[in-house]
Image (tube, helix red, strand yellow):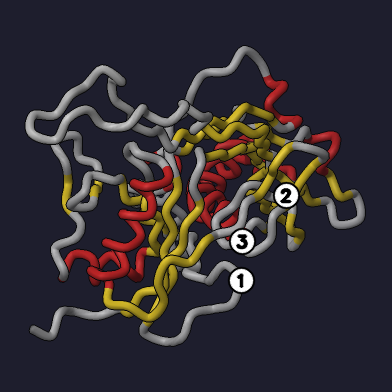
Amino acid sequence: MARQLIDLPAVFTPLPHGLWDTIQTPGTDGPHWQNGVTWIERCPTGDTTYDECLSVTGTGAPPEPPAKTPNVTQESRGATPFTVVAEFQCTPIGLGDAQSIAQDALDRVEQHQLENAFWTGVAADQAVVFPHLAADTEVLDGEVVLQTTASPVVTGADVAAALGALEQELANCYKGQGLIHVPRTALPTLAAWKLARLDDGGRLVTPNGNLIVAGGGYPGTGPDGAAPADGTTWIYATGAAFGYRSNVYFTQVRDSLNRATNTLRMQAERTYLIGFECCLLAAHIVLGVPTE
């Protein structure tokens, strides 16, 4: 007797604290961002001064304050789009369910593929995703900076020392709440060292209050793209990040029919663009629980 064919009863639930959950998603006025975007990046260092009439009891007046000088760097930065695709084959008999199946397939792979592309800079085996995390070369498009290099702040350190160094450099560079990007293999180590907690809004944060992006698609590779040694991983820090994504697009039946096999190649796809502010920093950490 043939077994009954049923619809899968389980509901797919993406893991929390991924990239799209953590970044800012501003609205758009149209689809033109899918050609890429450019913005003016301003990263201030700031300075201090004092009133030239100031007097200090017992020491007299201080010298005349130095002239004020520019302390905000400004440059044009840009980001390029990429597309996540899910494809399957079916017979024309199953056409009625094809779009829902394609949507379900995209739902299952979308977050992982988005995170992998943003970490590695690779889409369809080509280095075309800018900016991305694992980068050791600056990329320019004329005067527009598409990619900065990831500056390692520490290598081979325990996670507490490495995270502290990374967050200090982030504070020096960005001054506000940034993002700490970690592969999911690092989360148990962060938890063991009590370096990750949920804030009142349910977001995963460090003791300093930076948001943790735990990417299932983050491979943990270094700025040069090399895989980390066993028992270690790379983590990255950026300023606040933003992203755009399109609606889901499906192939048309007339474009997907393979007449030779009488099958349909159904696709669901969505285009993304991710950018971030000011900083790109890296740290190489040792995984494992505290020994003391």
Q: Residue at the location (16% across, 70% down)?
A: 192
Q: Residue at the location (13% across, 85% down)?
A: 291
Q: Secondary structure at mark 3?
A: loop
Task: Establish if 63 lies above or below 291.
Answer: above
Front-lying residue, 180 or 110: 180
- Asked if residue 124 can be seen in this view, the reply is yes
Mark 1 is on which residue type?
A: Gly
Residue 34 lies left or right of residue 116; in this view the side is right
Q: Quadrant of the N terminus?
A: bottom left
Specify which label sits upstream in the sequence, 3 or 2.
Answer: 2
Front-lying residue, 259 or 75: 75
Contact, mark 1 vs mark 3 (Cβ under 8 Å): no
Contact, mark 1 vs mark 2 (Cβ under 8 Å): no
- Give the mark toward the camera: 1 or 3: 3
Answer few, some or many: residues within 10 Å of disc 2's Cα (few below 14, many 20 plus, some between 14 and 19): some
Residue 91, numbered label: 2
Q: Secondary structure at mark 2?
A: loop
Answer few, some or many: residues within 10 Å of disc 3's Cα (few below 14, many 20 plus, some between 14 and 19): many
Task: Establish if 225 lies above or below 39.
Answer: below
Front-lying residue, 9 or 110: 110
Q: Quadrant of the C terminus?
A: bottom left
Q: Which percent across, then down, holds residue 214? A: 36, 55
Query: Which quarter of the figure has residue 134?
Result: bottom right
Q: Residue furthest top?
A: 29
Residue 225, numbered label: 1
Mark 3 is on which residue type?
A: Ala
Residue 135, numbered label: 3
- Give the mark toward the camera: 3 or 2: 3
Mark 2 is on which residue type?
A: Thr
Task: Establish if 162 lies above or below 28.
Answer: below
